[in-house]
Amino acid sequence: MTINRREALGLIAAPIGLAALGTDPLVGAQARSRPAVSGFKVLVAGGHPDDPESGCGGTIARYVQEGHDVVALYLTRGEAGIPGKSHEEAARIRTAEAERACSILGARPRFGTQVDGAYTAMQDLLTEERPDLLFTHWPVDTHPDHRAVSLLVYDAWLRTGKKAALYYFEVLSGEQTQLFRPTDYVNISAVAERKREACFAHISQLPAEWYPVHEHMGGFRGLEHGCAQAEAFLRHDQSPPLPLLG
């Protein structure tokens, strides 16, 4: 018998009643060791081109390898991100870099059309994509665009009925992401070089200056998770009980 991804998600969610008793079998190490069901839609939302890759690139590569459909969503096209370039020029350059990075990871790029006050745009996008897994920035962050996309995703998640499992990721922790306390990890040791290549596709952002911080972060999170390199996440506790790959 074959089942679709929504039916599979329902089967995984069945033990949720045990969570109220503190015996949810999908929590902690058991959750990380449980294999994922094939066919999930994964959406990773970042503020700019290079955010999904730097915060979640290894996890994106892992899910693509497992046969899942992964969308990298960029709230902006990085219009203000290249000194000396007009917004139009910078957007063209950074869009091409994001597309290159997605081709390396096997993800599908999408670009936000957020307009001030038009808060239904993200809701419409989630309604269209119907993700099972949703990743975005942790909202306590020094960069205003990171905070903005995090809250837009959270608002859209609420408005669409909390149907996706919501996880937050970190970028340049200590400098940008603050007060981040992981609940889950993904082992990215086997795809760490692919993550690096995807981040270095963003040539205009001088990745040699900042990517070493992410390599150190990956090594530190790997020590916490018991592997060489890992990415860390914080799960919203009202999410459906859908575990990560581990």
Image (spheres, grey):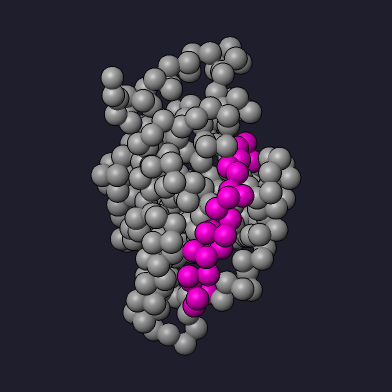
Quadrant for the C terminus in the image: top right
At horizontal 43% and vertical 22% (from top left) the residue drawn is 12
Which residue occupies 52% across, 37% down? 245
- Residue 60, relative to residue 165: is it above or below? below
Q: Position of residue 202 (x, y in %)?
A: 48, 71
Percent across and percent down for residue 98 are 41, 66
- Assess whether residue 78 is covered by the magenta stretch: no
Q: Is residue 116 left or right of residue 149?
A: left
- How many numbered circles does the render carry? 0
The residue range painted magenta reads 182-205
User: Is any atom of residue 138 visible in this view?
Assistant: no
Q: Is residue 226 above or below residue 207?
A: above
Query: Which of the pair 2/93 is nearer the observer?
Result: 2
Reply above or below: 208 against 2.
below
Residue name at image x 52 percent, y 36 percent? 244
The main secondary structure of the magenta stretch is helix
Establish if 92 lies above or below 178.
Answer: below
Direction from residue 102 to residue 7 in the image, left or right: left
Front residue of this view, candidates 154 and 116: 154
Does residue 32 appear in this view? yes
Residue depicted at x 47% and y 87%: 84
Residue farthest along the bottom direction in this orientation: 84
